Image (tube, rainbow, N blue to C red):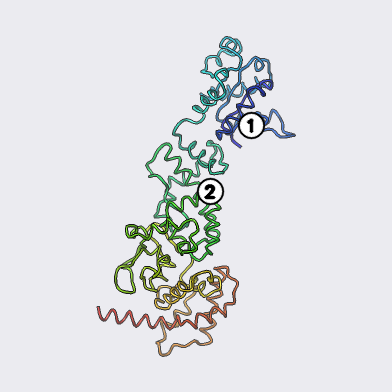
Amino acid sequence: MLHDVFICHASEDKDDFVRPLAKALQSHHIEVWYDEFSLSVGDSLRQAIDQGLATTRFGIVVLSPNFFLKGWANHELNGLVSRHIAERNLILPIWHNVGHDDVLKFSPPIADMVAISSASGMEAVVGELLKKIRPGESPLITARSFLIEKGLSPPVISDEWWLDIVETKEAEFLDPNLNHDWRWIFPLPYQLGARGKERGLDIAWTALQLDWAEDGAARKICQITHPEIVHDFLNQWPGLHECAQDNPDILALYAPQLTIPGFDNGLTHVFDELMSPERFDQCEAFRYGRAQTTDGNEPLCGDFIAWRHPSFGNFTAGELSNKFVTAQDGSYSREVFSGFECLIWLLSDNADWMPEKLRKVLLQGFTDRVQWWITTQYDRSIIDVLWNRSRSKFSYTKTLRAALTDQCTYALQELKIDEDPHKISSKFIEYGFLEGYYVEKDRIKQRRQET
C-alpha cells in the first residue's frame, strides 16, 4: 500500500506529540505510515520501515533531543535524505523541543530546511503540513478526498489506479457518443476544459460511475427490472442516487418504471417537474420523423416520462412499445434487450409488477407495429415464413410452432426467466402478433398509395 506521509520519530515522543499528530493527519484523510498503525505482529521492523520509506510521498521528521540519540530514527532519516536529494522537497521537518542550533549540530543540511515548530500548537502544525501534502486545487487530491467523503477507500494519489481513472476520463469514456455500450452513465458535473478542483470532482465522479455502470451492466438493470430492485441499486452505490436525482431525464430513460406513480419513491418531485411543458424537449426521444399520437396532435409530454402521464402522453400504442425498447436521445440509450426479448418478458409472469393498463397498451403496440421487432429474433425462420407466404396462406403449422417455441426458449434464457416456453409461445399465438404483421403491411401499403 502507498502512503502520503512517513513519520520518522523517536518512540519517547509518541505520547506527547507523534501519536496525536498521526491521528490528526488521518482525520484529514491523509494516508500515514506510522509504526503503531502500519506494523503487525511478526513484521520485520527494518523491512517494514524500508518499504514505508520507498512508498511514501513525504517524510515528516520529528526532530527532538530524543531523536538525536536514536539509531533507528537515523536509519529512517538517511533513507529520506537519499530520496530528498533525488526527488527534492520530500522531507518535512518538525522541531519538537529543539531550536536551530540543536538541529545545526545534528545535521546542517536539515537545519537549512524550512521547518515547523511544535511549539506553535498541533492545529498550526497540521495546517502547515496540509499546505504541502495537499496543495490547493490539486485535481487528484480533490478527487481522493471526495471519494473518501463518500465512504470509499481509494489509494493515495501516487498509485497507478489514478492513471487508469484519468485516462478513462480524458479518453471521454463518458462522452455521450460512446454511451450506447454502457448504461447508468450520467453527464459529469463540469466541462472537459475544467481545471483544478472542478477537474478533480469530474475525476471522482468518473471513478464512481465506472463502478456502478459495471455493476448495472452485469446485472442488466434496465426498463424491465422490478422497481424495487432498481431502487436498491440506486441506493447501493455511493453517489448514484444523488446523480440520478440531478439528471432525472436520463434516469427516466434508463428506468421508466420508476416514473410510474407508486414506483417513484423519493423521486416524485423530480419526475413531476419533468411533466411541465418547458421540460418537454429534455425528455423527448430521438427519432426520424414526428412522434405518432392517438389524435394526430403533438404529444402531451416527452417519451421518457410518458408512463407517468394519465393517457401516456397521447402516444400511440405502437410508439410506446417501440420506445419501451429503443428509446434514446442521441447521447444515452435505453436498449438492453431486443424487441423480441422485451415482448417475451411482457408475456411472462415477471412482468406482473407492471400496471395492467400499461402492460396491455405495450402488448397492443407490439401487435400494431410488428416489423420493427420481428427481425430481432435469433434466426430468420419465422420472418422467412411471413415474407414468403401471403396472408391467406399463413397458418401456424407444426414446424412454425416448434420454431416459435425455440425462439421463446432462447429469449427466456437471455432474460433468465424460468418459465415454460410452450406457455409463452401459446400466449404469443393468442395475441396474434404474426397476423398483425400482415395488417401492418397492408396499412403501410395503403399509406404509401395515398401519399
Quick one: 274 or 281, which is closer to the camera? 274
Disc 2 marks which residue? 238
Disc 1 marks which residue? 51
Mark 1 crowdedness (10 Å alpha carbons): few <14, some 14-19, many ≥20:
some
Q: Is residue 22 above or below residue 247?
A: above
Q: Quadrant of residue 310?
A: bottom left
Q: Is residue 407 above or below residue 391?
A: above
**How far across and how far down the image is residue 357, in percent?**
46, 73
**295 relative position to 238: left or right:** left
Identity of the residue drawn at 51% across and 74% down: 344
Residue type of the residue flagged with mark 2? Pro
- Callout count: 2
Q: Quadrant of residue 415?
A: bottom right
Residue type of the residue flagged with mark 1? Gln
Q: Residue furthest right?
A: 42
**291 relative position to 87: left or right:** left
Quick one: 311 or 254, which is closer to the camera? 311
Identity of the residue drawn at 46% across and 75% down: 360
**How far across and how far down the image is residue 425, in percent?**
53, 80
Q: Quadrant of residue 363?
A: bottom left
What's the distance in space between the residues labelled 1 and 2, CA to CA? 32 Å
Say which quadrant the C terminus sits in: bottom left
**How far across and how far down the image is residue 66, in percent?**
67, 16
Q: Is residue 83 above or below residue 266?
A: above
Mark 2 crowdedness (10 Å alpha carbons): few <14, some 14-19, many ≥20:
some
Q: Secondary structure at mark 2?
A: loop
Of tags 1 and 2, the one toward the viewer is 2
Q: Secondary structure at mark 1?
A: helix
Identity of the residue drawn at 31% across and 74% down: 295
**How far across and how far down the image is residue 252, in percent?**
43, 60
Q: Earlier in the sequence, mark 1 or mark 2?
A: 1
